[in-house]
Amino acid sequence: MTDHQPTPGDGHSTDDGVDRRRAWLIGIGLGILAIAALAVAFTIGTNYSDDPPPATEASAPPAAPADNTGPGRDLFIQRCGGCHALGDAGTTATVGPDLGKLRPAKAVVEQAIEKGGTGSGKMPPGLAKGEELTQIADYVAAAAGG
């Protein structure tokens, strides 16, 4: 029995002895490996970036319970509760922001009441002045946890 020797033109080898099918298979295999490596690198790069994950509402620390009864609460309900939601006051309006989620500091509340919100033009300025303004700001900051 004799071994079959590939001859030029039978699709298996060339004059210089290179097996074309094997060369094609090796090339295709290397190409697939390169694409897989790029896919893995892309996945790692997008999942492990240096940027911190975005903050969520659940990550905010819970507000400490406080005794929020008094004139500030009543004034808030009368003058602000028609537009703003605040769980402690039992208001659920949606014209202005939900102050329980916004959690504004006292100074922010005072400025919003004096100047009319944050500049959107929806909240009229001067809804309260003097002691009433301070009482509302104290109440909102305490009730909202700001």
Image (spheres, rainbow, N blue to C red):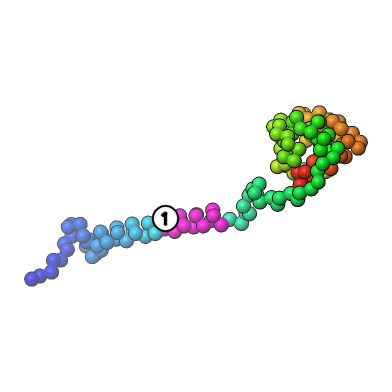
The residue range painted magenta reads 34-48
Q: Is residue 79 visible?
A: yes
| Residue 38 rendering spot, x and y as whole percentages | 46, 56
Q: Is residue 75 left or right of residue 19?
A: right
Which residue corresponds to mark 1?
35
Name which residue lies at 88% across and 39% down. Answer: 134
Relative height, residue 23 to residue 2 (above, below): above
> Residue type at mark 1?
Ile
Q: Is residue 64 left or right of residue 5?
A: right
Q: Is residue 110 visible?
A: no
In the image, farthest residue toward the left:
1
Relative height, residue 18 to residue 57 (above, below): below
Q: Residues within 10 Å of mark 1 (few under 14, many from 20)?
A: few
Name which residue lies at 71% across and 50% down. Answer: 62
Name which residue lies at 62% across and 52% down. Answer: 53
Question: Where is the N terminus found, in terms of image quarters?
Answer: bottom left
